[in-house]
Image (spheres, rainbow, N blue to C red):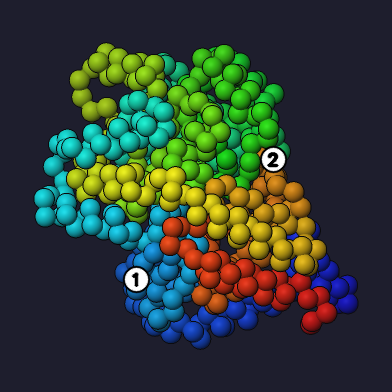
C-alpha cells in the first residue's frame, strides 16, 4: 500500500505526480458543476435528442462533466449560458482566428443577405476572392469547398486524375480533416490503419504511405517507387501538437518530391496563423497546391484550394478527357453567395500584414509568459509559437515527429489544466494545448491566461500537499 501511495506522489515524465493531477481534476469538476447550473440544465435537455448530447460527438471531448453552453461570442470573448465572459484562446480551433463576428464579415453578410444566399452561379465576389488568394499564396488558379476536409478530398481527386497515380503520402500523426485516406499511422515503424476510424470498409494501406515528419531518408524511400501522386502535409504539424520542420527539411523535401514526379500539397488551415500567405509563403516554400479552410471566411463555413499553372493545366485536361458525368468533386452549397462575401471581407480587410502584426506580438508575449511559469517550477515542458498560434507540450524540447509529439501528450494532465483555466474564465483548445491570438485579444486577456496557467502549475507542482 505504501508503495502505491509513493508511486501516486512520484513525479511522472511530465514532472507532475499522478495524484496531483487526479486531485486537481476532481476539484475542478466540482467547481465547474457549481458555477454552470444553466449549462447543466441545457445539457440535460439536449441529451434527449442529440446523440452524445452535443451537435457533433467530439464536442464532448472537453473534459467537462457536461457540455458548456454558449450564449454569444464577440471578438476575443464568448459568454456562456451562466453569464461568464470567457477570454477565448480556442477561437473555434482556428475557425474564428480573426475573432468572433468580426465587423467586416458581419457587414458583408448583412449586405449580401438581402441579395441572395445560394444560386450555383458565379459572382463578382468570386473573382475578387480568387485574385486575392492568388496574390497571397502565389498560386494562380483556385476552386472552393465548404470545409478544408472537402478541399483536401477534392485536391486528392484532382491530382490522382491529373497524374494517373493512386498513392498518397502523409506524415505520421497528421490530420487533414476527415479525409479517410490520411488515417494511417506508424506503430513501431509499421504502417497501420488508424483503429479509431469508424465504419471504414476499404483497406487504406494499399494507397496511403506514411513516414515520420523531418525524416528525409524515409521520405525518399517512400517516393522511390514512382507511384506517389502527392505528398499532403501541413508545413508545421499542428493537430498532434506542434512539430516544427527541422532546418533545411522542406527545402530538401521539395527537391525529393519533384525528382520523383509527385506533387506537394500544403494544408495551411492552421498555419495560416503565420501570415497572410501562410507558413509556406512566409518561408519561401513552393507547393503545387495549397488548401485553406476554417479562418478564410471569418468563421463562415468555406474553404479554398489553389493550383500552380502547370498542375492546373493537367487538372483541366483530366476533366476534359474524362467521360461526362459527376466528377465526385464539389457540393451544391459550395461557393454560395454568403461564403464568397465573407471570404472577400476576410481577405481584403482582415488577412493583412497590419492585422497580423499585433497578433504575432501578443502571441510572443503569451509564449514568454507560459515559459516563465514553466521555468519557475523547473518542469520539462516546452512552448512553441507559429505566428499567432502558441502551444505548450509536456516534453523538454520540441518534438521532431509525430511519434515524439504523441508520446508527449498526457490526456489527464491536459484535462486538469484546461478545466482549471475554464473555471477561471479562460478557454483553450480541448484536443491539445493550443492557444490562438486574434485581433481583438488584449494584453489583459493574455495576462489573465498567464496568471491562470501559473495558478494551475502551482497546484500541480506542489508536491508537499497531500
- Please name whichever residue, 144 or 353, is drawn nearer the observer in this view of the structure: 353
Q: Quadrant of the N terminus?
A: bottom right
Name the element at disc 2: loop
Q: Residue furthest front?
A: 354
| Residue 30 picture location, percent across and down | 57, 83
Q: Is residue 419 visible?
A: no
Please give left or right for residue 456 compared with residue 92 in the image: right
- Please name whichever residue, 394 or 442, is drawn nearer the observer in this view of the structure: 442
Q: Residue at x 54, y 29 (%)?
A: 284
Name the element at disc 1: strand
Please give left or right for residue 322 compared with residue 114 in the image: right
Q: Is residue 123 visible?
A: yes
Report which quarter residue 163 is drawn in. top left
Q: Is residue 118 above or below residue 288?
A: below
> Badge 1, how many Cα within 10 Å: few under 14, some, many 20+?
some
**Residue matched to label 1:** 72
Q: Residue at x 25, y 36 (%)?
A: 128
**Residue matched to label 2:** 400
| Residue 300 picture location, percent across and down | 31, 52
Q: Is residue 216 above or below residue 432?
A: above
Amino acid at each position: 500500500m505504501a508503495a502505491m501511495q509513493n508511486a501516486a506522489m512520484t513525479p511522472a515524465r511530465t514532472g507532475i505526480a499522478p495524484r496531483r493531477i487526479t486531485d486537481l481534476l476532481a476539484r475542478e469538476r466540482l467547481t465547474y458543476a457549481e458555477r454552470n447550473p444553466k449549462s447543466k440544465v441545457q445539457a440535460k435537455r439536449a441529451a434527449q435528442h442529440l446523440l452524445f448530447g452535443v451537435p457533433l460527438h467530439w464536442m464532448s471531448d472537453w473534459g467537462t462533466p457536461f457540455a458548456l453552453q454558449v450564449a454569444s461570442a464577440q471578438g476575443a470573448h464568448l459568454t456562456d449560458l451562466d453569464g461568464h465572459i470567457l477570454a477565448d484562446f480556442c477561437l473555434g480551433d482556428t475557425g474564428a482566428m480573426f475573432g468572433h463576428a468580426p465587423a467586416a464579415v458581419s457587414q458583408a453578410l448583412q449586405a449580401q443577405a438581402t441579395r441572395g444566399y445560394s444560386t450555383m452561379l458565379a459572382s463578382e465576389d468570386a473573382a475578387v476572392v480568387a485574385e486575392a488568394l492568388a496574390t497571397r499564396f502565389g498560386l494562380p488558379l483556385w476552386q472552393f469547398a465548404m470545409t478544408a476536409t472537402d478541399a483536401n478530398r477534392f485536391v486528392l481527386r484532382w491530382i490522382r486524375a491529373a497524374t494517373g497515380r493512386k498513392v498518397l503520402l502523409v506524415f505520421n500523426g497528421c490530420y487533414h480533416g476527415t479525409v479517410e485516406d490520411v488515417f494511417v499511422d506508424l506503430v513501431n515503424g509499421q504502417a497501420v490503419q488508424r483503429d479509431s476510424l469508424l465504419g471504414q470498409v476499404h483497406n487504406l494501406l494499399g494507397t496511403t504511405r506514411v513516414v515520420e515528419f523531418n525524416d528525409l531518408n524515409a521520405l525518399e524511400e517512400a517516393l522511390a517507387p514512382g507511384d506517389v501522386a502527392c505528398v499532403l502535409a501541413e508545413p508545421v504539424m499542428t493537430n498532434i501538437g506542434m512539430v516544427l520542420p527541422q532546418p533545411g527539411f522542406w527545402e530538401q523535401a521539395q527537391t525529393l518530391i519533384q525528382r520523383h514526379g509527385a506533387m506537394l500539397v500544403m494544408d495551411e488551415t492552421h498555419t495560416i496563423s503565420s501570415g497572410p500567405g501562410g507558413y509556406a509563403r512566409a518561408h519561401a516554400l513552393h507547393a503545387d497546391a495549397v488548401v485553406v479552410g476554417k479562418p478564410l471566411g471569418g468563421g463562415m463555413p468555406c474553404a479554398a484550394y489553389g493550383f500552380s499553372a502547370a498542375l492546373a493545366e493537367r487538372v483541366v485536361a483530366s476533366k476534359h478527357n474524362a467521360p461526362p458525368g459527376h466528377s465526385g468533386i464539389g457540393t451544391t452549397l459550395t461557393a454560395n453567395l454568403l461564403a464568397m462575401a465573407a471570404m472577400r471581407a476576410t481577405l481584403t480587410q482582415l488577412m493583412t500584414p497590419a492585422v497580423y502584426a499585433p497578433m504575432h506580438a501578443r502571441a510572443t508575449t503569451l509564449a514568454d509568459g507560459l515559459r516563465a511559469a514553466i521555468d519557475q517550477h523547473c518542469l520539462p515542458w516546452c512552448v512553441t509559437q507559429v505566428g499567432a498560434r502558441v502551444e505548450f507540450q509536456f516534453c523538454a524540447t520540441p518534438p521532431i515527429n509525430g511519434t515524439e509529439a504523441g508520446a508527449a501528450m498526457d490526456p489527464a494532465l491536459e484535462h486538469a489544466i484546461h478545466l482549471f483555466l475554464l473555471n477561471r474564465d479562460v478557454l483553450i483548445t480541448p484536443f491539445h494545448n493550443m492557444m490562438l491570438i486574434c485581433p481583438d485579444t488584449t494584453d489583459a486577456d493574455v495576462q489573465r491566461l498567464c496568471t491562470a496557467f501559473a495558478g494551475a502549475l502551482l497546484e500541480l507542482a506542489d508536491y508537499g500537499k497531500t
